[in-house]
Amino acid sequence: MDFGNFSVSLAVKDLETSRAFYEKLGFVPVGGEAAQNYLILQNATSTIGIFQGMFEQNILTYNPGWNRKAETLAEFQDVRAIQRELEARGIELTARADESTTGPASLVIMDPDGNTILIDQHAG
């Protein structure tokens, strides 16, 4: 399975305080909107999203169809195909992509320790 580009989505208490902290670690904003309470930051090798008031816990996030610059790949495994493969392997989904649609969709699974894994396809 190819889940696509990886990032960590962090639930933060104060967007500006978190932005300043991660900038001191060498991260720079590359996307998102502070007015909508989220920013995407990158350093040389890592991508993190900081989100204020959007969810309660941190999330491992994968984006099928995107590279590190959020550019659409020419070929990628659709989230619905990933979903079918996960189910065939006995993985329980906590949120499903609608199989009757195409294009952007997402699914959610939980690891055995309760960590949320979001597979969020923006590419069509």
Image (spheres, rainbow, N blue to C red):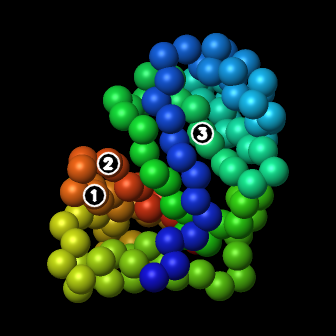
Residue to which mark 2 is pinned: 115
Residue in the foreground of this view, choosing between 101 and 19? 19
Residue 53 seen by the camera: yes
Mark 2 vs mark 3, CA separation in Å: 16 Å
Residue identified by numbered label 3 = 49
- Residue at the image point whose x is 24% and y is 83% from the top: 89
Whether residue 24 sits left or right of residue 87 in the image: it is right
Task: Give 82 or 45, whichever is nearer the viewer.
Answer: 45
Say left or right for 124 vs 114: right
Residue type (three-letter) at the residue carrying disc 3: Gly
Q: Residue at x 65, y 85 (%)?
A: 75
Residue at image coords 18%, 78%: 90
Q: How many marks on residues?
A: 3
Where is the C terminus found, in terms of image quarters? bottom right
Measure how far apart labels 3 and 1 are at the Cα level: 20 Å
x and y, in percent, of residue 111 in the image: 28, 57
Looking at the image, residue 71 sits to the left or right of residue 115; the answer is right
Helix, strand, or loop for circle 2?
Answer: loop
Q: Earlier in the sequence, mark 3 or mark 1?
A: 3
Residue 111: assigned label? 1
